[in-house]
Image (cartoon, coloured by chain):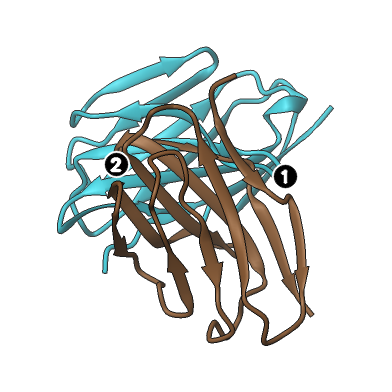
Amino acid sequence: GQQLNQSPQSMFIQEGEDVSMNCTSSSIFNTWLWYKQDPGEGPVLLIALYKAGELTSNGRLTAQFGITRKDSFLNISASIPSDVGIYFCAGLGGSNYKLTFGKGTLLTVNP
Amino acid sequence: DGGITQSPKYLFRKEGQNVTLSCEQNLNHDAMYWYRQDPGQGLRLIYYSQIVNDFQKGDIAEGYSVSREKKESFPLTVTSAQKNPTAFYLCASGASWYEQFFGPGTRLTVL
């Protein structure tokens, strides 16, 4: 089946630093989604990308849909303590119309 | 308030017992989904329903069953046939595959 490789698995950064994480796949996706999950809660949708090459921002978050349609990245600028959580990428399309999730990036921000 | 509710937040059951997890939404969404999350893993799709009285198996349906008798409700039963039932279960609803809004989750522990 389709798989997403999300990296890094975890990050420890200082407040104020910028963060970058990415997802890659051997399959083509038609939509890329980025979610954030707080401990013990459900994921919350941060950004949705629908076109190859698309660059979309949501406050301090910026995400891009790779031109090959096989990758996406998420950047967080000027991190703050409430950015702590697990960030998931998810892809839709390709061989079937089901969301495929990456394994997540655990972000820790030291104040 | 509009949203997705899952109850209970924490559930404990003895091995060999069936248990039903509740998921209700008042967002008027046609589609509803159940995912399982294990530590350090992405979300894996158990079952989904795109319309009332119809549902489809996801990637890990064995040992689970669902019903969709009402648009608002999509309960998941974890049966005794599920070999490793202890996990965090997430319900979602949406107008389409790329618009999935998650509930707060139920943590099931089988003793």
Dot 2: chain letter: B
Asked if residue A27 is positioned above or below residue B87 in the image, the reply reads above
Asked if residue A7 is positioned above or below residue A56 in the image, the reply reads below
Residue A18: % across, % down: 60, 26
As helix, strand or loop, the secondary structure at mark 2 comes to: loop
Q: Residues within 10 Å of mark 2 (few under 14, many from 20)?
A: some
**Viewer-side residue, A86 vs B109:** B109
Asked if residue A105 is positioned above or below residue A50 in the image, the reply reads below
**Viewer-side residue, A45 vs A110:** A45
Write down the colour of chain B: brown
* Residue at mark 1: A39
Q: Residue at x 53, y 86 (%)?
A: B81
Q: Quadrant of residue B82?
A: bottom right
Q: Quadrant of the N terminus of chain B?
A: top right
As helix, strand or loop, the secondary structure at mark 1 comes to: loop
Write down the colour of chain A: cyan
Q: Residues within 10 Å of mark 1 (few under 14, many from 20)?
A: few
* Residue at mark 2: B97
Type of amino acid under label 1: Pro
Tally the marks: 2
Relative placement, left or right, of B25 versus A51 is right
Dot 1: chain letter: A
Residue B41: % across, % down: 55, 62
Residue A8, visible in the rendered structure: no
Q: Residue at x 54, y 22 (%)?
A: B2
Q: Residue at x 18, y 57 (%)?
A: A96
Relative placement, left or right, of B68 versus A104 is left
Structural distance between the alpha carbons of marks 2 and 1: 24 Å
